[in-house]
Image: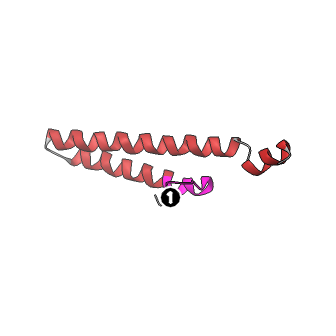
Amino acid sequence: MKHSPQRFDVDSLSEDIRECYQLAADCARRAKAEADPQLRQDFLDMERRWLFLARSYELTRQLGRSAPSRASQDARAGA
């Protein structure tokens, strides 16, 4: 997840999305194998957060693809 805070490259989000889902799956596996109830819950909480982040990236990607580019907006405005 290597994005500058100033801009997102919408096309590269698929790598980040995939990584989030992989990390979530790892947390789920670790939770299943964990004997300590508190640690198990911690892993399940982390899994939930990774899934939330993946879905957030997916939404960002969808919005980025459906939104008109700044250049086309400027062209229509006559700038």
Residue appearing at x 84%, y 43% in the figure:
76
The image shows residue 12 at horizontal and vertical percentages of 58, 58
The image shows residue 51 at horizontal and vertical percentages of 42, 42
Residue appearing at x 15%, y 39% in the figure:
37
- Judged left or right of residue 37, residue 45 is right
The image shows residue 13 at horizontal and vertical percentages of 55, 53
- Determine whether the residue tagged by mark 1 lies in a helix, strand or loop: loop
Q: Amino acid at mark 1?
A: Ser
- Judged left or right of residue 11, residue 56 is left
Q: Which residues are magenta?
A: 3-16
Of residues 77 and 5, the one nearer the viewer is 77
Residue assigned mark 1: 4
Q: Quadrant of residue 40?
A: top left
- Figure check: 79 above or below 37: below
- Figure check: 19 above or below 37: below
Q: Quadrant of residue 73?
A: top right
- Judged left or right of residue 11, residue 3 is left
Q: Quadrant of residue 77?
A: top right
Question: Magenta stretch containing residue 13, yes or no?
Answer: yes
